[in-house]
Structure formats: structure tokens, C-alpha cells
Amino acid sequence: MPVTARTILSASLVADLSSLDFGKSLTGASVSKTLTFSNQGASDVVTGFGRTFTTSTGGLFSQVSSTCGSSLAVGASCSSVYLFTPSSAIASAGTLAVAGTRSALPSDLSFSIAASGTGITVLYSQSSWDAGSLIVNTNTPGPNVMLSNPSTTQSASGCRYTLSD
């Protein structure tokens, strides 16, 4: 069972991740992470609950869905899904700013969660090939495919390719 980091962001508001590390993603592809917030306070309802991304490389991080509303009752939790979609092969960083107000002891709650991800590019150097005659639904060996990563600082993993007619 994986252990999940828990970050206590205030006296009553908890996030299940201490950061949003999206790892490496092919440029143009998206990687998602889900962040769950819970109100573990004894009596405070969190109101004016908002989440906004700021980033040094604009638009690469975004919220795509959320069960969170503008308030979070005591004992309740909600989740938001965030995407990292790199447009170039560079490391990117951003900050998820979270804000709200406690109802019992009116005071602002504000904190941030760091976000990071790296875009990578993988090149395929052959525009077409003749695979010859292959038998459907068998493990007939096809032609070799060479993928290369032009980056000298980033590794590529989880690469996939699809053959179509």
C-alpha cells in the first residue's frame, strides 16, 4: 500500500499531497494528478475556498475538474484534478495558491503547494517503412524501430508507438 504525504495547511484544512510533482511528460501530452483537501477542524467551516495556479511558464498547469465548492464543511473532503501539459522540452515550476476563511474564528487561510514537471521530446527518424507480410494476431517480428531522445539532460520512459494502415 503506497504511503501518501499529508500536508496540514492550517488548523483545519489538510491536503493529501505536499507537492504536485508531475514528473516527465512528452511535449503536447498531459499528465494528471488528483489533490484531495479535507477539513479536519472541530468546528470551523472553510468558506471562500479557492484554488488558483500561478506559474513561471504560463498555462502549463491547469485545474480540469473539481468536486470542491466555495466552502468545505467540518469532516468533509473534496478533490481537484490538475494537468501538466508541456509545450517544450524544459523543466517547469508553478504554485497552486489556496485560500479560504475559517467561520468560527474569522481569519484568512492561505498557503501554497509547489507544482513541477518536465517536458521531454522523443524523435522518430523514419517517416515510413514496409513491414512486409505480417500474420494478424501472431507475434510475427516486424521491423526494428529506433526512437531517439535529443535531450542531453532528460531521460524518456514509457514511450509508445502505434502502427496504422
Image: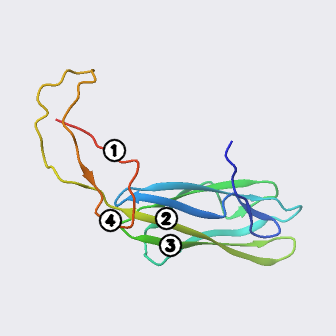
Per the model, the C-alpha gap separating discs 3 and 1 is 26 Å
Q: Which residue is mark 1?
A: 160
Q: Which mark is residue 93?
A: 3
User: Which of 157 and 86 lies nearest the eye of the viewer?
Assistant: 157
Tell me residue 119's x, y (percent): 39, 64
Circle 4: element type = loop
Tell me, yes or no, whether the two marked residues, 3 and 4, touch with CB atoms within 8 Å: no
Per the model, the C-alpha gap separating discs 1 and 4 is 18 Å
Tell me residue 79's x, y (percent): 64, 54
| Nearer mark to the viewer, of 2 and 4 | 4
**Mark found first going from the N terminus, 3 or 4:** 3
**Mark found first going from the N terminus, 3 or 1:** 3
**Mark found first going from the N terminus, 2 or 4:** 2
| Nearer mark to the viewer, of 3 and 1 | 1
| Nearer mark to the viewer, of 3 and 4 | 4
Q: Which quadrant of the figure has residue 112?
A: bottom right
**Mark found first going from the N terminus, 2 or 1:** 2
Q: Which mark is residue 151?
A: 4
Which quadrant would the C terminus be assigned to in this image?
A: top left
Q: Which residue is mark 2?
A: 62
Circle 1: element type = loop
Q: Which quadrant of the figure has residue 89?
A: bottom left
Q: Residue at coordinates 41% horizontally, 62% vertically from top-left?
A: 85
Task: Identify residue type, mark 3.
Answer: Ala
Position of 82 relative to 60 (above/below): above
